[in-house]
Amino acid sequence: MDTIVVPAQEEGFKETFIGEKCWYSIRISASMISKIKYIAAYQVAPISAITHVAEVERIEKYKDTAKYILYFKGDAKQIKKVSLSGQSKTKAPQSPRYTSYAKLLEANTLEDLWA
């Protein structure tokens, strides 16, 4: 698992993920920090899909918290949407989740990532 998927509201997604090329205040398991190579944004409703991915340049502690900030190597790239399957909202990520970059590029639905 080399990719972290984070839920993003529209405003934060546009301003921070796309505009600032980073994402912050993320809880990450200590054992996963060295493994994370990519970050993917799950845009919440009404989009309800992972739409963009970025390569992670570095991960640093975020302020005086137990959370982290991920800086991107470049611009986030739009990918083929990975959507919720059917009407199920139970699989939508509410907090960071891990998957692999290869799985992300092959997936059609979020279920494909978590299976």
Image (cartoon, rainbow, N blue to C red):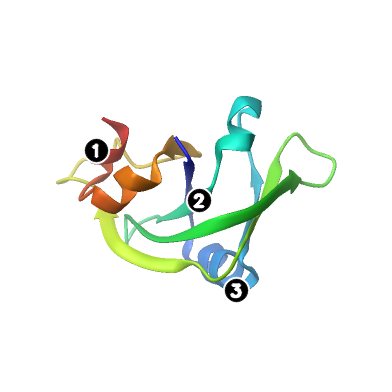
Distance, label 2 to label 1, CA atoms, is 19 Å
**Residue lying furthest top in this view?**
31
Q: Position of residue 61 (x, y in %)?
A: 77, 43
Quadrant of the frame with the C terminus? top left
Could you tell me if the residues under marks 2 and 3 are in contact, i.e. CB atoms within 8 Å? no
Mark 2 or mark 1: whose residue is earlier in sequence: 2
Task: Looking at the picture, tell me which residue is in the foreground, 20 or 36.
Answer: 36
Judged left or right of residue 29, residue 107 is left
| Residue type, label 1 | Glu
- Which class describes the residues within 10 Å of circle 3: few (<14), some (14-19), or many (20+)? few
Instruction: Using the image, determine if residue 59 lies above or below residue 16.
Output: above
Q: In the rendered image, which quarter is residue 15 located in? A: bottom right
Mark 3 or mark 1: whose residue is earlier in sequence: 3
Q: Position of residue 112 (x, y in %)?
A: 23, 39
**Residue lying furthest right in this view?**
64
Quadrant of the frame with the N terminus? top left
Q: Which residue is mark 3?
A: 19
What residue is drawn where x is 50% and y is 50%? Answer: 38
Judged left or right of residue 25, residue 115 is left
Distance, label 3 to label 1, CA atoms, is 29 Å
| Residue type, label 3 | Gly
Q: Position of residue 93 (x, y in %)?
A: 40, 41
Q: Which residue is mark 1?
A: 111
Task: Looking at the picture, tell me which residue is in the foreground, 87 or 29.
Answer: 29
What residue is drawn where x is 21% and y is 40%? Answer: 88
The numbered disc on residue 38 is: 2
**SS class, disc 2:** strand
Q: Nearer the viewer, mark 2 or mark 3?
A: 2
Q: Nearer the viewer, mark 2 or mark 1?
A: 2
